[in-house]
Amino acid sequence: MKRLVFAFIAAYAFIFLWGWLLNGVFLKDVYAQTPNLWRSQSEMIGLFHWIIIGQALIVFSFVIIYASGFAGGGVIAGIRLGVLLEIAAIGMRLGFYAVQPIPGKLILYGSIGGLVEMVIVGAMVGAIYKPVPPRTA
Amino acid sequence: MNWKKFFIAFVAAFGFIFLFGFLWYGKLMNGAHQEVPILWRTDADFGNHFSALIFGHIVMAFFLTLVCGRFVPAGGAAACATLGILVALIYAGADLITFAVQPLTTKILCGWIAGDLIQFAIAGAIIGALYKSESRMTT
């Protein structure tokens, strides 16, 4: 349980930092090309708690999935799970791209950034979380 | 991995996800979506990007089936439905972030989250019911 909490905190801290770097710094100019699709800066600040809760939910679900079905495989299993889930998320992004006038560049860079993010998250969770060995009689 | 069963489960999952998406997000939530028309492509533009929608659904169904195969190698509707719910929570987290950065209404946010949970729980159950590894089949 302790390791589960550590894995969650470490992965959350990384995802928060990476999300800010990717979306707030690297892709800032790409977002600026479609201002009508995004909230104003002040509105986003007012709703910032939803970003924190959303990221926490993503990391929580990832850690639980890893602990329930992938633990024991270590870093490699974590990376594998991260890649599988991120490629499924790329499918979702393509769905959004079909219905919203989001620039293709944003989908491409967002997907590459998402893949890097989930590989690192998977590696961190896989390295930190270790299943409890079964008790021998 | 039993690839024949895997393929059948993937096709069924794709069929369900696509149909559910059309009914839930396209029909049931159409009124809610129209409250913020600036966020959506026009019908003609959507038609031009329809292939991305199909391909996105194929990718989602394929990788959900793959995660189910690895997570629950023996299959089983209940276990895979549980995994589907956990995967839906990841999508729900992404929905919350989208809500914070895009001018969505709370009605749209709630509809998307409910849709994700129902869609992935049922898709997981379908995959789990259809996909069974060789070891489970022979015991």
Image (cartoon, grey):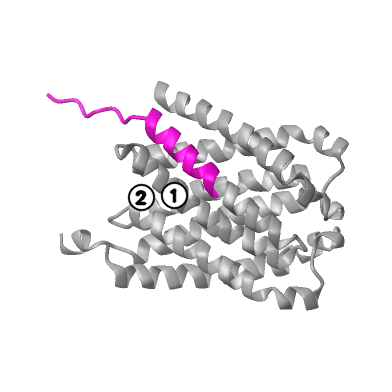
Query: Residue B84, can we see it?
Result: no
Tag 1 and tag 2 share a subunit: yes
Say which amino acid is labelled 2.
Phe
User: Is residue A98 toward the left or the right of residue A133 in the image?
Assistant: right
Residue B33 at x, y = what percent?
Answer: 79, 61
Position of A123 relative to B59 (above/below): above
Label 2: state its secondary structure.
helix
Say which amino acid is labelled 1.
Leu
Specify the farthest residue to the left. Answer: A137
Quadrant of the image occupied by residue A104: bottom right
Q: Tell me the residue that label 1 is attached to.
A: B83
Tell me whether the residue at label 1 lies in contact with that at label 2, contact meaning CB atoms closer than 8 angstroms. Answer: yes
Nearer to us: label 1 or label 2: 2
| Disc assigned to residue B71 | 2
Q: Main secondary structure of the magenta part?
A: helix
Circle 2 packing at 10 Å, graded few (<14), some (14-19), many (20+), is some
- As measured in the structure, the alpha-carbon distance from the residue carrying label 1 to the one carrying label 2 is 8 Å
For residue A135: magenta? Answer: yes
Look at the image and give the residue range highlighted in magenta. Answer: A115-137
Quadrant of the image occupied by residue B20: bottom right
